[in-house]
């Protein structure tokens, strides 16, 4: 009787990468970063266009190099690039990554793994956390602040350096791989959402948060977002990319309730145009460049089709003011 042999991921071998070349920076320092050789591992993220903020990148790389017993928590508004910062750094270092989209009903067993039925047998299938601890991957708990704090309490010992114990697999003990890294993201800083903008955010235990160093992430500045669009949609005219970024900042200003910068008669918006949404709008504008009123057509799909009619009209009115004649006529291919 033949036994089916499943292909195993290639063994990870360490490799070193030069900072400037790897992250497209221009510094006067020669710094080598430890990562892994490019072996086609399926868990290594795909490299995508990304403009790294130097300060945040410095903090992230310091953590990846030596967490010193900490986890890393990135906090900031929706779509500002918290997760992408980690994923794109990992992609360039060829570091396998396990992504866990957190939800309010998540249980610890979802992270550890479970036994599954396979041709009459019940082998144990390792979860994202178990795999990351065992093989030295980066674990990203995306939107960790919506998780039940009681479930996360089961991870305290792990972040303190204790091995992972899988009671579900006969008490298997998994020592923590020296290259394992625990990263979490959240729209809040863990103390709950006082703004009321993010549904489902829960106040996390202080004992849990005390195990993390924190990086605050905000939307990129105007120059950086123009650079991002330059990489993602280089075929869009420069003036269009600039006006898209200007509109995004106007929408954000009204979303955050910046009364000091808000003009008389302007209302606060309940939605924002994140960097993620901005890129989506730009790509759709390029995709549908032959459509009438293409920027309005694309903006509806990217954002405004899901908002109340009054807010949709307000955003489109601001866009018309920002774009001028371009709003009516679109752009040439």
Image (tube, rainbow, N blue to C red):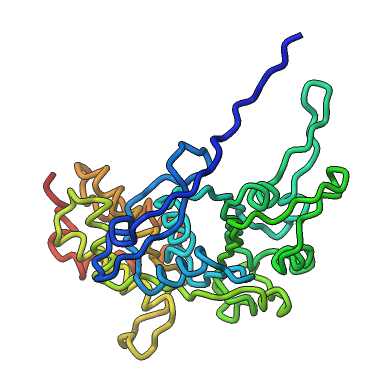
Query: In the rendered image of this protein, does residue 53 appear above or below residue 299?
Result: below
Rendered residue at 43%/41% (across/down): 38
Looking at the picture, how far across and down is residue 132, in whole percent? 63, 50
Residue sitting nearer the eye, 298 or 308 = 298
Residue 88 visible in the displayed image:
yes
Coordinates of residue 250 in the picture (x, y in percent): 31, 74
Q: Nearer the viewer, residue 170 or 50?
A: 170
> Residue 32: x and y, percent?
38, 61
Outermost residue toward the bottom in this view: 260
31 up-or-down from 208: above or below: above
Answer above or below: position of 95 versus 68. above
Quadrant containing the N terminus in the rendered view: top right
Residue 143, quarter of the rendered image: bottom right
Q: Residue at x 56, y 65 (%)?
A: 185
Quadrant in the picture for residue 261: bottom left
Quarter of the image that includes the C terminus: top left
241 or 211, nearer to the observer: 211
Q: In this view, does 72 lie to the left or right of 332?
A: right
The quarter of the picture where residue 157 lies is bottom right
Residue 266 position (above or below residue 4): below
Q: Position of residue 171 (x, y in %)?
A: 86, 48
Q: Which residue is drawn at 47% across and 48% down?
A: 36
Q: Measuring 64% from the left and 57% from the top, which residue is drawn there?
A: 102
Q: How many labels does the image show?
A: 0
Let me know if residue 318 appears in the view. no
Is residue 127 rendered to the left or right of residue 302? right
């Amino acid at each position: 009787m033949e036994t089916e042999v499943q292909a195993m991921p290639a063994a990870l071998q360490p490799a070193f990468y030069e900072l400037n070349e790897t992250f497209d920076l221009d510094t006067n320092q020669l710094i080598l970063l430890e990562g892994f050789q490019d072996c086609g591992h399926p868990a290594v993220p795909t490299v995508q266009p990304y403009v790294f903020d130097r300060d945040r990148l410095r903090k992230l790389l310091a953590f990846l190099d030596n967490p010193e017993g900490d986890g890393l928590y990135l906090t900031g508004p929706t779509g500002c690039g918290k997760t992408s910062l980690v994923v794109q750094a990992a992609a360039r270092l060829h570091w396998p990554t396990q992504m866990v989209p957190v939800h309010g009903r998540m249980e610890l067993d979802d992270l550890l793994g479970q036994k599954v039925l396979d041709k009459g047998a019940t082998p144990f299938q390792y979860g994202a956390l178990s795999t990351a601890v065992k093989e030295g991957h980066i674990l990203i708990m995306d939107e960790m602040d919506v998780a039940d704090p009681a479930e996360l309490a089961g991870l305290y010992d792990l972040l303190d350096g204790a091995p992972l114990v899988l009671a579900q697999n006969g008490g298997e003990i998994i020592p923590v791989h020296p290259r394992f890294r625990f990263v979490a993201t959240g729209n809040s800083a863990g103390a709950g959402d006082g703004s009321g903008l993010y549904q489902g955010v829960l106040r996390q235990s202080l004992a849990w948060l005390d195990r993390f160093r924190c990086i605050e992430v905000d939307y990129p500045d105007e120059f950086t977002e123009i650079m991002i669009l330059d990489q993602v949609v280089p075929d869009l005219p420069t003036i269009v990319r600039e006006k898209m970024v200007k509109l995004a900042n106007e929408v954000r200003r009204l979303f955050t309730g910046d009364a000091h910068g808000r003009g008389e008669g302007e209302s606060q918006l309940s939605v924002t145009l994140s960097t993620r949404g901005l890129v989506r709008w730009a790509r759709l504008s390029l995709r549908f460049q032959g459509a009438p009123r293409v920027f309005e057509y694309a903006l509806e799909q990217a954002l405004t089709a899901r908002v109340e009619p009054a807010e949709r009209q307000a955003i489109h009115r601001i866009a018309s003011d920002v774009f001028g004649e371009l709003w009516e006529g679109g752009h040439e291919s």
